[in-house]
Image (cartoon, rainbow, N blue to C red):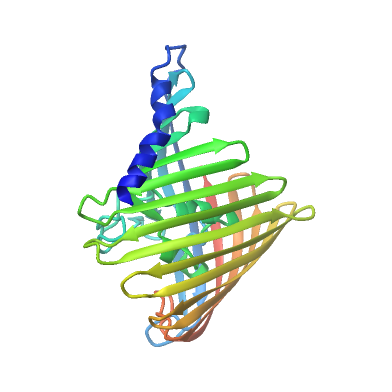
Amino acid sequence: MRLGLMWALLRFQAPLVLSLCAPPASRAEPSVSVYGLLDTTLRHATHADAGGSSLFSMNDGAFTGSRLGFRGTEDLSSGMKAFFSIEQGLDPSAGTLMQVTAAANYGQTAAPAGRAFGREALVGLNAGSAGTLTIGRQYTLANVYSGRFQPNANPNQEVLALLVGHQLIRQDNMVQYTVDAGPVSASVSATLGEGMNGASWAFAVAYKADGVDAAAYSSSMHNVDNSETRRVLGTGAAFKLASGWKAYLGTMKRRDSLSRQTNTVWVGALAYSAGSFVYTLSAGEDRQRRVAAGSRQLAWLHVDYLLSKRTDLYVVLDANRITGAYPLTAFMTHRGQQHGAALGVRHRF
């Protein structure tokens, strides 16, 4: 399977390689930009500490993580461009690095203290209609394409997210190739593993036109010693309804080959925009079987007020419920229900 995927990557890259051989033309000067986002929430939650009492905390953004990034491009002529992106995550409450990985597994090397550029670190070539090739630490295709059928993509805080824990957000040592053909886009990726973190492959396709944004993806990830394989399959769509209204619906299934753990997740949402306000109501469920059978249900209401193009103020009300033997999450210490309320401020620069 891995050899077949690498052959597919090489075959897809043929048009990109040919474009490198085209005669030179005029080139624009290289450009580098600095950008960032700071997003901080104050949250009160029930059943959150070791004694089961309420907890008041300051956290990174609810839906978007705080970051500092650098990106640049260079025109190589004949429609070809080189580019890079390095982006670090940070916790604004303490200024510490984010994207901590306790141990190497499923395509990620160990980083117990966080990463200097943990959100993204890649270099790539864009050849227009021939496609885009990127190499480095990148977002998984499952994370990117599932974000198309969720109103705020995949939420940054675990308390609001159901999919990311199964399909992962980012992986190291990744080669990715994407082609856009009108309303259709397709991507293929592979992580090399290198004997340190487990190899993986993924494929995704999407369609966007006439008020519909649909996506489907499949991935297979191996643990460090190749004894366990996690397979993920997901699909969903976003639909524009009446003026200001948008609906979202998606599902994902995870299966582990050795432990036989199976998770079936569904997510749905309805969003409405009016002037400077955006209202979003979302719900979902993660049902786990065969290992620690049980479920987690989640619902949240998000009201966002746009103070400007760069700054917004938002409120999130959330409710989580864990039943059966479903594993306890990091934000809940007891089975049953937790209710939370958060106030957030986000600024882009």
Q: Residue at x 69, y 55 (%)?
A: 239
Question: Can residue 136 be seen?
Answer: no
Question: Can residue 261 be seen?
Answer: yes
Picture layout, residue 331 above or below residue 95 = below
Q: Nearer the viewer, residue 72 or 314?
A: 72
Across and down, in percent, residue 172 comes to 31, 50
Q: Residue at x 72, y 45 (%)?
A: 210
Across and down, in percent, residue 218 comes to 46, 56
Q: Quadrant of residue 271?
A: bottom right
Across and down, in percent, residue 188 comes to 43, 45
Q: Does residue 131 appear to the left or right of 182 in the view shown?
A: left
Across and down, in percent, residue 295 comes to 49, 80
Q: Residue at x 42, y 86 (%)?
A: 325
Q: Does residue 128 appear to the left or right of 85 in the view shown?
A: right
Q: Nearer the viewer, residue 205 or 112?
A: 205
Q: Quadrant of residue 51?
A: bottom left
Q: Nearer the viewer, residue 66 or 256?
A: 256
The outermost residue toward the right is 242
Picture layout, residue 312 above or below residue 268 = above
Picture layout, residue 230 above or below residue 291 = above
Picture layout, residue 164 above or below residue 123 = below
